[in-house]
Amino acid sequence: MAISASTLELVAVRAGEGRKARRISDDVVAALTAEGFFRHFTPKAYGGREGRPQDFFLDQIAIAERDMSTAWAMGIVAVHNYQIALMDPRAQSTLFADGPDAMVSSSYNPVGAKAEKVDGGVMLSGRWGWSSGCLHCNWVLLGGVIPQEGYRTFLVPAKDYRIEDTWKTMGLQGTGSNDIVIDTPVFVPDHMSHKQMDGFNAVHSQPPGVYDLPWAQVFIRVVNTSAIGAVRHALALMRERVGLGTTDMAKNPADPDVLDRIARASNLAEEAAAVMVRAYDEMEAANWKPTLLQRARFRYQASLVGDRCIEAMDLLMDIAGGRSVFVGNAFQDLWHDVRMARAHVANNPVSFARNYANMLMGAENADLFI
C-alpha cells in the first residue's frame, strides 16, 4: 500500500488548519479512509487488508513528511484495528459491523481508571488523557487494572464516554489528544476487553499469519515513527532555505558545518527507518513469531527513535536561521512536534535498555509489553 500523491498533498495543505483547530481536518480523514489507511490492519474476514506492519509504517512516515500531527493521530487510530483483531470475535463483529474502516482512539494509562469486577464484565469509570484523534472516533480503548486480575484494555462506545477539551500544547496540536471521561460507571462485557497477557502471547482466533505477532510489537512503533517523517520534512524546508551562491555563511551550503549537520540529520532519520523495516522483515521471516530476546531488542530499538530524531532536529534548528525563533515558524513547529513525541512513555529507552541488556546477560524478561 502507498498513499497517493493527491492525498499527501491534501495533508500538507490542511496541516496549518489542523494545528490551529487542534484536530485533523475532516477532509484529510475522508481521504485517508478512501485510501484504505484505516483498514490496513483489519482482518480480511471483515473486508480489511490484513497488511504487513512495515508497509503501514512506511505510509505513516510519508504522511508525516507533510504533517506529523496527521501521521501521529491517524496512525494511532488505524493501528488499533490490529489489537481489535486479537480480541474476542464478538468484539470484532461489533466493531466492524459498519465496515472495515473502524476508527478507534485509545488511552492505555490506567492511573485515572476504576475497574470493578461484576458478573460478566466490569463496571468502568474514570478519566484518561492523551486520546489522539478521539474527535473522529466512535469507540475508544481504555486501560484499567482489575484488582486481583491485572491489566486489561476495555473497548467502549462513544455513547458511554465524553471528550473533554484539554489539548492546549506546545506541539502536535493537530492530534486533538483530549481527555476521555466516564463520570458514571458503565458496564463493559468481558468479551469487549483484552487481557494484557493475551496481547503478550498473541492469543487470537485469526488464521496463522501476521496476527501471530504480539500486539506490543505493532503499537510501540506507531508513537515514534512519525518523527522520522518530521525530520525529512525539516530537511525539505532546509533545501528551500539554503541556496547555492548565498553570501550568508550561516546558510551557505559550502559551509562545512552546515553540510555536516544536514548529512548527520538525514542519516539519523534514515537509520531509524532502516532499523524499523529490518526489524519487521526479521519478524516476517520468523513467520511473525520472534523470540523473546528479539522482541526485547525490537522494543529497545523503537524507543530510541525519539532521541535520534530530536538530535537530528537540534542539528537543523541551529542552522535554520534567525526567523526560526518566531512563533509559527515551520522549523520551530517541527522541533516542538518531535519533542512532544519523545514525551510518550514508550519513547523513553531507559527501562527497555535495562531489560534488553539483562536478557543478553541471561536474565528473564521483565517487560510484558514487548
Image (cartoon, grey):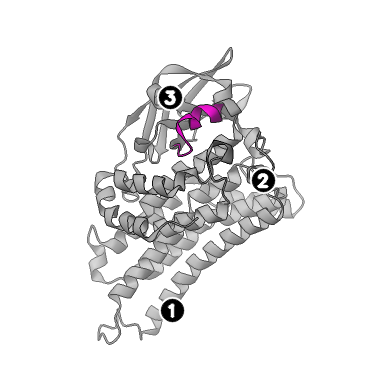
Magenta extent: 91-102
Looking at marks 1 and 2 on the same chain, the residue that comes earlier in the sequence is marked by 2
Q: In this view, does 69 lie to the left or right of 306?
A: left
Q: Are marks 1 and 2 in contact (CB under 8 Å)?
A: no
Q: Does the magenta stretch include residue 100?
A: yes
Dominant SS type (magenta): helix
Give the residue type at disc 1. Asp
Give the residue type at disc 3. Gly
Q: Is residue 33 visible?
A: yes
- Residue at screen point 40% across, 58% down: 4
Q: Is residue 146 visible?
A: no
Query: For the residues marked 3 and 2, what is the alpha-carbon distance in whole angstroms?
Result: 36 Å
Looking at marks 3 and 2 on the same chain, the residue that comes earlier in the sequence is marked by 3
Q: Is residue 191 magenta?
A: no
Residue 155 image offset from top left, x and y in percent? 50, 28
Residue 233 image offset from top left, x and y in percent? 37, 64
Residue that badge 2 annotates: 209
Give the residue type at disc 2. Gly
Residue that badge 1 annotates: 260
Q: In which quarter of the image is residue 82?
A: top right
Vertically, is 257 above or below 78?
below
- Residue at screen point 54% across, 48% down: 220
Q: Mark 1 or mark 2: which is in front?
A: 2
Quadrant of the rendering where the C terminus is positioned:
top right
